Image (cartoon, helix red, strand yellow):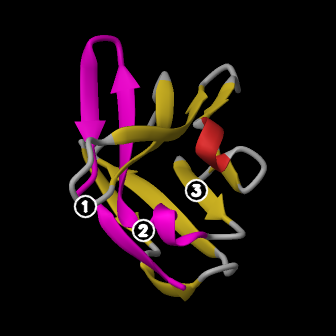
Amino acid sequence: VQLQASGGGLVQAGGSVRLTCAPSGRRGSFKIMGWHRQAPGKQRELVASLTAGRELTYADSVKGRFTISRDVRKNTWYLQMNSLRSEDTAIYYCYAAEGTINYWGQGTLVTVSS
């Protein structure tokens, strides 16, 4: 199973970006799908996650600004990021979990200019 993250880039503060995660090598959904990020000099942190049962989790720092969603037919999930701030600059990694197995995408860089 491979996860392909896309959609990153350079955006001005206050702008929006949508990230996409598309898995390959697997047809069914995962138990947990989501996004982490790692800013320069910081540890990787959870941004948002979505379970197969539609339970949502968000980091406090992104609540009200970011939205995770999923397209069941495409087996793809998204992270809509609005009202971006300079502190949102990071490499964003999509991930999925099934039982004890975790899958990670290669990461996509989001740079927010102030």
Image point 34% across, 12% down: which residue? Answer: 99
Instruction: Say if residue 81 shows up in the picture.
Output: yes
The residue that label 1 is drawn on is 40
The location of residue 54, given as percent across then percent down, is 70, 26
Going from N to C along the chain, the mark reached first, 1 or 2, is: 1
Magenta extent: 85-114
Left/right of residue 69 with respect to residue 41 in the rendered view: right
Element carrying mark 1: loop
Instruction: Say if residue 29 shows up in the picture.
Output: no
Going from N to C along the chain, the mark reached first, 3 or 1, is: 1
Q: Main secondary structure of the magenta part?
A: strand
Residue 78's mark? Answer: 3
Give the spatial CA distance, label 1 vs label 2. 8 Å
Image point 24% across, 41% down: which residue? Answer: 1
Element carrying mark 3: strand
The residue that label 2 is drawn on is 89
Task: Single out the mark in the foreground, 3 or 1.
Answer: 1
Left/right of residue 35 with respect to residue 67 in the rendered view: left
Q: Residues within 10 Å of mark 3 (few under 14, many from 20)?
A: many
* Amino acid type at mark 1: Pro
Element carrying mark 2: loop
Whether label 1 touches label 2, CB < 8 Å: yes
Task: Single out the mark in the foreground, 3 or 2.
Answer: 2
